[in-house]
Amino acid sequence: MYIANTTKQNWHLNVWVPEARRHQTIPVASGRQVFIGKDWNSTQNDSVVLQLERFGARPARDANGKLEYFPGILYSHDKPIPVDKIEMGHEAVVESQEKRAGAELTKGALGFDAALRDKRTRKRLARTSSLEVTQDVPKGTKPDGKEVVFGVTVANDGTDRLNLS
């Protein structure tokens, strides 16, 4: 079985293989794939697949479709995972992270807006409330124009608007 890591982090997958008497730790470097289970029977293989799927891993054939809430692990039973599938998986990871970040920013903006209201009357004290998130640039590097910047504005009627750039 082949396991591919589509994220920018190194993964250490812990799996329990039946009849092995202990768990196995499988290191998978960022953007790489590893072959595991050379001597496993189908029961052991299926057990590991169930464990991987429980934590969000998907079969490599699903990389062409929509991968919502994808943590970044693909697997294939019989052949190596093509590079284009790993790249598609990485794009799905980034998209999932952006959606989560936007949702958390919206929650923060709505909470900020609620905190700015008059305690007694619950009336708004400001016309709009805005929050903006900007990606930090590591020390010693210059901005390259690809930094993530997005914000949320809460209007007077309580609706929110997400701005991605």
Image: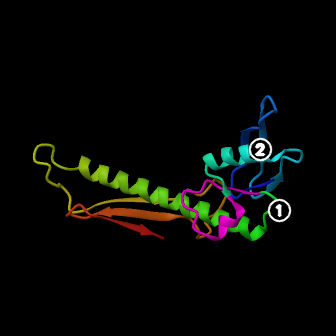
Residue toward you, 140 or 83: 83
- Residue 58's tag is none
Which residue in the structure is indicated by mark 2? 43
Q: Which amino acid does label 2 sit on?
A: Thr
- Left or right: where 127 falls relative to 60: left
Q: Which of marks 2 and 1 is nearer the N terminus?
A: 2
Q: In this view, does 149 lie above or below 29?
A: below
Query: Where residue 152 sits: x, y (%)?
Result: 37, 62
Residue lying at 80% horizontally and 48% vertically, measured from the top left: 42
Which residue in the structure is indicated by mark 1? 80
Residue 57: in magenta span = no
Query: As drawn, which residue projects farthest toward the right?
Result: 39
Q: What residue type is labelled 1?
A: Pro
Mark 1: few/some/many CA within 10 Å (<14, 14-19, 20+): some
Per the rendered image, the range of residues in magenta is 59-76
Query: Where residue 19 sits: x, y (%)?
Result: 81, 33
| Residue 47 in which image quadrant | top right
